[in-house]
Image (cartoon, coloured by chain):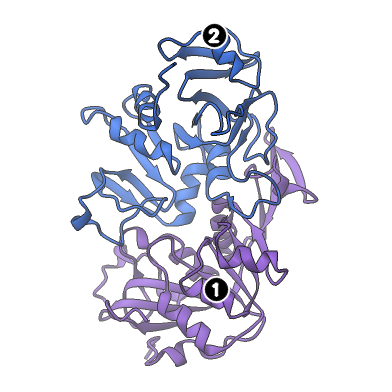
Amino acid sequence: MIDKFVPSLTEAMAGIADGATVLIAGFGAGIPDTLLRGLLAQGARDLTLVVNAAASEEGPVAELLAAGRVRKVMCSFVRAASTASRLQREGRLEIEMVPQGTLAERIRAGGAGIQAFYTPTAADTVLAEGRETRVIGGKLCLLEHAITADVALVDAWEADRWGNLTHRATARNFNPIMAMAGRLTIVQTRHVVALGTIPPQHVQTAGVFVDRVLHVPEGDAA
Amino acid sequence: MIQGRDRLAIARRIAEDIPEGWFVNLGIGMPTAVSDYIPPEREVIFHAENGVIGIGPAPAPEEADPYLVNAGVQPITLLTGAALVHHADSFAIARGGHLDLCVLGAFQVDEAGDLANWAHGLTEPTRQIGGAMDLAVGAQRVWVAMEHCTKAGEPRLLPRCTYPLTARGVVQRVYTDLAVLEVTAAGFAVREMVPGLDFATLQSRTGATLQRG
């Protein structure tokens, strides 16, 4: 019987190695906060985080950064008053700025087995300096490489034992594409449902992309 | 003393120019208010980068759903007929030319239509790229909502942007507290000035050379 549920946070986070690249889903909503606290407790170091924003001085991403566990962040948005910005000024963190759509597409491509693609986004900006560009269809385009990762941390609203997921409202955001791009995809879900409960046409992330699922009931975020 | 448009009045002025049927993305800040000024009988569909097609009015605070937010992470509602997609599909909308219009804020715009809206310099610790580079190159039209000058009185409409660019040659129209301008082959053309403002005064507050009409 296929059963992707794990009974504890410790088991959910087991085996994440030092040096791992970790995709962190979420955009205001749909943040896998419990799994992030699990990663903090798990202890892996020298991590590369791929996350939309590193804009805060609090919250689980900032805590991982502040604990000195992260070597590099790839993100689309950094604020001056953020832990990421402070660590970069101190020479303790590398930040790679990636336009948000390029970030999403690099992750999607990674999950889809596409090695790289050309896009006009950022082709005419400082982000393209020293990188490969070419004119395609009359437009200057920038070569962007796919992102795959050792681990993806994903949030869901409902999950069944095959790992089929739904995401509530705008909590979907990066979750389905990060689930695709992680070699080990770990999910926290608000609700556990029996196999077949989610109508097949309503599955938003298919279970084939999911490895482990942890039940984190509402109000039990950390 | 000339009474310029305040930020909401700029948003209201932009809303006047958006016709029924357009599919529109509004940037964070001043542009977000544009949707409040679209009359209910005019069907315009608003997109948010985090996967919303059909943003409705802001909810009352007690009705806010933490699972339903816009790209500025403010609570929203959905219109009847709305759709939700994941982030890659949402940016396929932006990058694939499916938006009729994107309204963005800016630090600087220049007479070639170059847009600078993510950093004040390359050493600037705040780097707010977000989805702006994708939207700027992907939308059918890019309009900018901005103050004509900085708080220190420095012009933001320039012959050439001095801040790092978001995209080159993409801005078609600029709405400021003082005027509505179009980017043409000959540079900024003044389409409209607020009452009481004359061309020479507007020119004195603009870094680029303005064209009449």
Rendered blue, the chain in question is: B
Q: What residue is at 75 percent from the left and 45 percent from the top?
A: A133
Depth check, front residue: A123 or B147: B147
Label 2 SS = helix
Q: Nearer the viewer, residue A53 or B139?
A: A53
- Count numbered badges in the picture: 2
Residue type at tag 1: Gly
Q: Secondary structure at mark 1?
A: strand
Q: Nearer the viewer, residue B160 or A89?
A: A89
Question: Image quadrant for the C terminus of chain A?
Answer: bottom left
In this rendering, the answer to whether A13 lies above or below B93 is below
The kind of residue tagged 2 is: Phe
Residue at (54%, 57%) from the top-left corner? A104
Q: Position of residue A204 (x, y in %)?
A: 36, 64
Q: Position of residue B110 (x, y in %)?
A: 64, 26
From the image, tell me which residue sits under label 1. A182
Q: Residues within 10 Å of mark 2 (few under 14, many from 20)?
A: few
Q: Horizontal and vertical percent for residue A112?
A: 56, 63
Chain ID at mark 2:
B
Observer able to see residue A73: no
Direction from residue A166 to residue A59 in the image, left or right: right
Residue found at the very far right of the displayed protein: A130
Nearest to the observer: residue B207 or residue A29? B207
Circles 1 and 2 on the same subunit: no
Quarter of the view holding residue B208:
top right
Residue assigned mark 2: B199
Query: Does the CB distance between marks 1 and 2 fall below 8 Å?
Result: no
Q: Residue A220's spot in the image, x, y percent?
A: 30, 81
Tell me the chain of label 1: A
User: Which one of the lettered chains is coloured purple?
Assistant: A
